[in-house]
Amino acid sequence: MNDTPLALPTLTGERTRLREWRADDVSVVQEASGDPLITLVTTVPRTAGEAEALAFIERQHDRLDSGTGYAFAIADLDGHAVGHIGLFLAGGRRASVGYWIASSHRRRGYALDALLTVTAWATALENLDRVELHIEPGNEGSWLLAERAGYEREALLRAWKRIDGNPRDMYMYTRLTEHALASSDRN
Ligand SMILES: CC(C)(COP(=O)(O)OP(=O)(O)OC[C@H]1O[C@@H](n2cnc3c(N)ncnc32)[C@H](O)[C@@H]1OP(=O)(O)O)[C@@H](O)C(=O)NCCC(=O)NCCS
């Protein structure tokens, strides 16, 4: 956590551009609201109402203002939003990444490109040592994606997080930042 408002960069990958959420991205949030896994593990609303989707977009800007993290819309190279990726500051020089892609845009490499792009940016940040992904063992698509992006599975964290009121196990996937790697070389 951080008390200072954060500034969101625009990051460009090979297939995606990571940029701020805009009100005209509302339809992709409305599509995501029909996905039971996305609504279970994120703050995407469970109803497809426009007002609720716009409130989700507004909350993404609040994360910057409160210094809790960076929330990007994942857009294709034509500028259309296809999903979400966020870097959330966990304290202790750690940050975690979360992501989703709306179902009609999956298996086109958008999540992989977005994760590679955000990771390249985050691992160069001086104030971070670790970038983490917390992925349920049953979410094989997500942990295969993490491994394709160069993350290493460090552990199974038992009862790491409550989801829908129930303690759930998570795999901890990690990439160390350039700063942390350079320091460990010196030790
Ligand atoms: C997981 C998720 C983000 C993947 O998005 P995507 O854009 O379809 O992923 P990509 O097209 O970039 O996939 C890249 C690689 O990851 C792996 N992968 C992704 N989805 C997969 C799936 N459902 N099954 C198996 N492997 C998968 C594959 O290796 C894939 O490469 P390939 O298509 O050449 O085989 C998407 O399915 C999603 O939003 N799921 C619901 C929310 C969620 O699980 N978020 C993560 C919480 S930890």
Image (cartoon, rainbow, N blue to C red):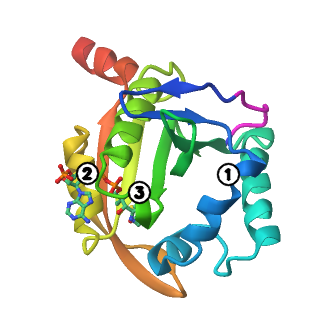
The kind of residue tagged 2 is Leu
Residue matched to label 2: 145
| Local crowd size for mark 1, using a 10 Å CA cut-off: few (<14), some (14–19), many (≥20) | some
User: Which stretch appears magenta?
Assistant: 2-7
Q: Measuring 27% from the left and 21% from the top, which residue is drawn there? A: 184
Q: Measuring 57% from the left and 69% from the top, which residue is drawn there? A: 31
Of 160 and 83, the residue lying toward us: 83
The N terminus lies in which quarter of the figure?
top right
Horizontal arrangement in the rendering, residue 87 relative to residue 114 (left or right): right
**Which percent across, then down, holds residue 98?**
47, 53
Q: Which of the 4 image quarters holds residue 15?
A: top left
Q: Which of the 4 image quarters holds residue 149?
A: top left
Contact? badges 2 and 1 (CB < 8 Å) = no
Q: Nearer the viewer, mark 2 or mark 1?
A: 1
Contact? badges 2 and 3 (CB < 8 Å) = no
Residue matched to label 1: 25
**Element at label 2:** helix
| Local crowd size for mark 3, using a 10 Å CA cut-off: few (<14), some (14–19), many (≥20) | some
Q: Nearer the viewer, mark 2 or mark 3?
A: 3
Whether the residue under disc 1 has CB within 8 Å of ligand 1? no
Marks 2 and 3, the one that precedes in the sequence: 3
**Which percent across, then down, holds residue 112?**
32, 43
Residue 48: mark in rendering? none
Residue matched to label 3: 105
Task: Name above or below for residue 43 compared with residue 80.
Answer: below
Whether the residue under disc 2 has CB within 8 Å of ligand 1? yes
Task: Name above or below for residue 10 compared with residue 97.
Answer: above
